[in-house]
Image: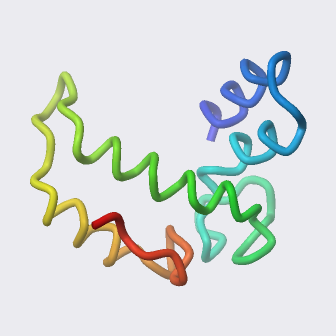
């Protein structure tokens, strides 16, 4: 995703390369779908896999200009539904 690449460039001057890598890969899908880097599964940095869940959780549970925040349980069920495809199946959903 372009925003992950742009975000990595933004933080690069103020963080170490490990953090840059985490930001760069946080939209890589665990099952390789929509993964520009070619990393799949455990090849995706653990920090990126954790950030992917946190980023999705924040996106779903926050009000957006185009929709209100989802209820907590609905967001939780969406993370469970996408476990093993978009998200690492070993990472539990928030709450």
At a point 85% along the width and 45% down the height, the residue shown is: 18
Residue 90 image-quadrant placement? bottom right
Q: Which is more toward the observer, 42 or 33?
A: 42
Residue 58 image-quadrant placement? top left
Q: Name the spot of residue 36 as percent of width and height, x first.
A: 73, 53
Q: Name the spot of residue 54 as percent of width and height, x first.
A: 45, 51
Q: Name the spot of residue 93 as percent of width and height, x first.
A: 37, 70
Does residue 52 appear to the left or right of 57 in the view shown? right
Does residue 76 appear to the left or right of 1 in the view shown? left
At a point 34% along the width and 64% down the height, the residue shown is: 94
Q: Is residue 16 above or below residue 71?
A: above
Q: Which is more toward the observer, 62 or 15?
A: 15
Of all residues, the one furthest to the right in this rendering is 17
Residue 76 image-quadrant placement? bottom left
Q: Is residue 14 above or below residue 1?
A: above
Does residue 39 appear to the left or right of 73 in the view shown? right
Counting the numbered discs, the total is 0
At a point 79% along the width and 55% down the height, the residue shown is: 37
Does residue 31 appear to the left or right of 38 in the view shown? left
At a point 67% along the width and 59% down the height, the residue shown is: 35
Q: Is the N terminus in the top left, top right, bottom left or bottom right quadrant? A: top right
């Amino acid at each position: 995703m372009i925003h992950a690449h742009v975000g990595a460039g933004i933080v690069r001057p103020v963080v170490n390369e490990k953090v840059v890598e985490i930001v760069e890969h946080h939209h890589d899908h665990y099952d390789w779908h929509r993964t520009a880097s070619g990393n799949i599964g455990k090849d995706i940095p653990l920090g990126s896999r954790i950030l992917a869940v946190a980023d999705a959780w924040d996106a779903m549970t926050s009000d957006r200009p185009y929709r209100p925040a989802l209820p907590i349980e609905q967001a939780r069920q969406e993370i469970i539904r996408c476990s093993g495809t978009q998200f690492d199946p070993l990472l539990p959903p928030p709450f």
